[in-house]
C-alpha cells in the first residue's frame, strides 16, 4: 500500500511590508484610543468646572499646554500631540485656561495624562495625581473638579501666606497667569 501525501495549501506568508503595515495599523488604533480617552476626560472637565465654581460666564477653556492662549477653546490644538502628523502613542498633555478673577485673569493648568490598560492617570502640573478606572464616571469627574479647584485656591493662598510671612521668593516655576481681554 502506498502512502499518498496530501498537499495542504497554506496561504502565502505576509510580505514584510504587510507585516509592518499591520503593526502600524494596530499602533494607529491604540494611539487613537489613547487620544480619544484623554480628550474625553479633558472635555468633561472643561464642561463641568466652570459651573462647579459657580461662575455665570464661560470661564474654563481647553488651551495649548505651552505658548500664548486666548479665552477660547482650541479643540485638538489644546493637546500636546497636535500637529505631529502620525498620532503618536504617548502620554498627552493639555492646558486648562481657568478664569481666576473678575478682571479677566486666567491661569493655565497643565494636565499630563496617560492610559494604561483600563486606567487613566492624570497629573496636575508637577503636583497632584489622579487615577481612574475606565470608563469614567460622574464621581470621577466630581473628584477631579474639586481637586483642580482646591489646587488653584491653594496656589494663591500659599503665595499670600508666604508673602505675609516673608518667604515668597521661591525658585519654583509657578503658573502661567495672564490677563485676557474679552474677545
Image (cartoon, rainbow, N blue to C red):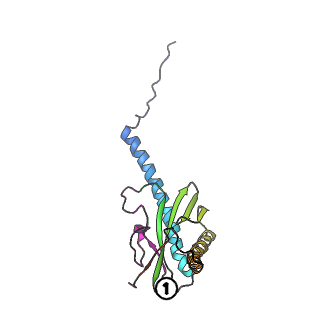
Rendered view: 79 above or below 153: above
Q: What residue is shown with label 1? A: 57
Can residue 165 be found in the magenta stretch?
Answer: no
Q: State the SS at label 1.
A: loop
Residue name at image x 51 percent, y 74 percent = 46
Assign the C terminus to one quadrant of the image: bottom left
**How far across and how far down the image is residue 90, in percent?**
47, 55
**How far across and how far down the image is residue 174, in percent?**
50, 71
Front in this rendered view, residue 46 or 182? 182
Q: What stretch is highlighted in magenta?
A: 58-86
Residue name at image x 55 percent, y 81 percent = 51
Q: In which quarter of the image is residue 104?
A: bottom left
Q: Main secondary structure of the magenta part?
A: loop
Extreme front residue here? 166
**How far across and how far down the image is residue 95, in percent?**
47, 69
**How far across and how far down the image is residue 153, in percent?**
58, 78
Few, some or many C-alpha atoms within 10 Å of disc 1 (few <14, some 14-19, many ≥20)?
few
Q: Is residue 83 left or right of residue 173?
A: left
Front in this rendered view, residue 34 or 82? 82
Numbered-mark total: 1
Residue name at image x 42 percent, y 75 percent = 73
Q: In this view, does 150 lie to the left or right of 85?
A: right
Q: In which quarter of the image is residue 85?
A: bottom left
Can residue 81 be found in the magenta stretch?
Answer: yes
Amino acid at each position: 500500500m502506498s502512502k499518498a501525501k496530501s498537499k495542504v495549501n497554506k496561504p502565502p506568508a505576509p510580505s514584510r511590508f504587510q507585516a509592518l503595515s499591520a503593526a502600524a495599523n494596530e499602533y494607529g488604533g491604540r494611539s487613537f484610543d489613547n487620544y480619544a480617552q484623554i480628550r474625553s476626560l479633558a472635555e468633561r472637565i472643561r464642561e463641568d468646572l466652570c459651573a462647579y465654581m459657580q461662575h455665570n460666564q464661560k470661564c474654563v477653556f481647553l488651551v495649548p499646554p505651552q505658548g500664548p492662549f486666548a479665552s477660547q477653546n482650541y479643540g485638538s490644538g489644546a493637546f500636546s500631540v497636535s500637529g505631529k502628523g502620525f498620532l503618536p502613542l504617548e502620554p498627552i498633555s493639555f492646558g486648562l485656561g481657568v478664569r481666576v478673577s473678575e478682571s479677566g485673569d486666567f491661569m493655565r493648568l497643565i494636565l499630563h495624562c496617560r492610559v494604561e490598560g483600563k486606567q487613566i492617570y492624570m497629573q496636575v502640573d508637577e503636583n497632584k495625581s489622579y487615577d481612574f478606572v475606565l470608563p469614567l464616571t460622574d464621581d470621577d469627574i466630581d473628584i477631579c473638579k474639586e481637586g483642580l479647584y482646591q489646587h488653584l485656591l491653594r496656589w494663591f493662598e500659599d503665595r499670600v501666606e508666604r508673602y505675609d510671612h516673608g518667604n515668597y521668593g521661591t525658585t519654583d516655576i509657578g503658573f502661567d497667569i495672564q490677563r485676557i481681554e474679552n474677545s
